[in-house]
């Protein structure tokens, strides 16, 4: 039974870095989880990953420093429950737009009386090496509640959202955020950049770490200097492609 190291770092104000598993490849997960990353994000929203594959990917992190978190397909309590029962140590809730949705997300990851999570965590308790009776308290203290902020409605409600107790990080989904303004992919557009700044400043006001993607060394340093504390360096596919292209470029290809 160990504390969640990502949760501890975030509470201490330290940055955490990770990558997204967008495929069900156990080999890719074994490499990423042993690479020094703080967390690996299993993507059930956009990747071809079902619950059985997610469970296998979670198991592949066993004995590594990487904390497995899962982005569920939608912000549904039952979806969160299933991935936590499979051993996820964090749940990413997509498209959070209101305070009520944030409150529901926090409740979904907590057992009563703090929340509404149903009880049947045999696999999760076994993964943590603890009796069933000890698991609820551990889970309430250690499982991460992570909110994706990726719509202009969420920006309008950002102070109400981030004032909800129990949020471990608010992560900017910059592509969908830009799309919600009719500016898909225009991340540096003043309207999108301004919205991202509003989210970051609200996180600082409410002492909620804010996350973002940064896929180059320069971008990572820039985002850390700006105050972001949850950094995604890319997906398994993107990292593999980048490595191959860099080597081919060096060879004049």
Image (cartoon, rainbow, N blue to C red):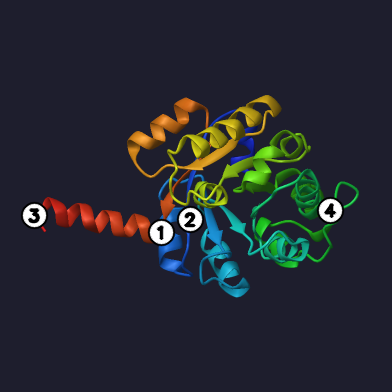
The numbered dot on residue 236 is 1
The numbered dot on residue 252 is 3
Q: Earlier in the sequence, mark 1 or mark 3?
A: 1
Using the numbered discs, state the Cα–Cα distance from disc 4 to disc 1 in whole angstroms: 33 Å
Of badges 2 and 4, the one in the foreground is 2
Q: Earlier in the sequence, mark 3 or mark 4?
A: 4
Of badges 1 and 3, the one in the foreground is 3
Q: Earlier in the sequence, mark 2 or mark 4?
A: 2
The numbered dot on residue 111 is 4
Q: Is residue 200 above or below residue 45?
A: above
Residue assigned mark 2:
20
Percent of width and height locating residue 74: 67, 62
Nearest the eye: 21 or 26: 21
Q: Residues within 10 Å of mark 4 (few under 14, many from 20)?
A: some
Q: Earlier in the sequence, mark 1 or mark 2?
A: 2
Q: Residue at x 58, y 43 (%)?
A: 171
């Amino acid at each position: 039974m160990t504390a969640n190291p990502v949760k501890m770092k975030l509470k201490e104000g330290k940055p955490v870095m990770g990558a997204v598993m967008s495929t069900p490849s156990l080999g890719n997960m074994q490499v990423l989880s042993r690479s020094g990353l703080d967390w690996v994000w299993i993507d059930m929203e956009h990747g071809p990953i079902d619950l059985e594959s997610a469970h296998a990917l979670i198991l592949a992190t066993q004995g590594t420093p990487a904390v497995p978190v899962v982005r569920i397909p939608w912000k549904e309590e039952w979806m969160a429950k299933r991935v936590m029962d499979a051993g996820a140590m964090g749940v990413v809730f997509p498209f959070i737009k209101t305070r009520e949705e944030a409150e529901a997300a926090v409740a979904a990851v907590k057992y009563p009386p703090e929340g509404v999570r149903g009880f049947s965590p045999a696999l999760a308790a076994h993964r943590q090496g603890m009796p069933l009776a000890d698991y609820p308290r551990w889970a309430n203290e250690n499982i991460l509640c992570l909110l994706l902020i990726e719509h202009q409605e969420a920006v309008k409600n950002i102070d109400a959202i981030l004032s909800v107790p129990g949020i471990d990080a608010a992560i900017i989904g910059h592509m969908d955020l830009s799309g919600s303004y009719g500016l898909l992919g225009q991340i540096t557009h003043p309207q999108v950049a301004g919205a991202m700044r509003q989210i970051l400043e609200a996180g600082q006001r409410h002492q909620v770490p804010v996350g973002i993607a940064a896929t180059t060394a320069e971008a990572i340093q820039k985002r850390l200097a700006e105050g972001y504390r949850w950094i995604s360096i890319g997906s398994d596919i993107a990292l593999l492609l980048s490595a191959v292209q860099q080597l081919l470029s060096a060879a004049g290809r």
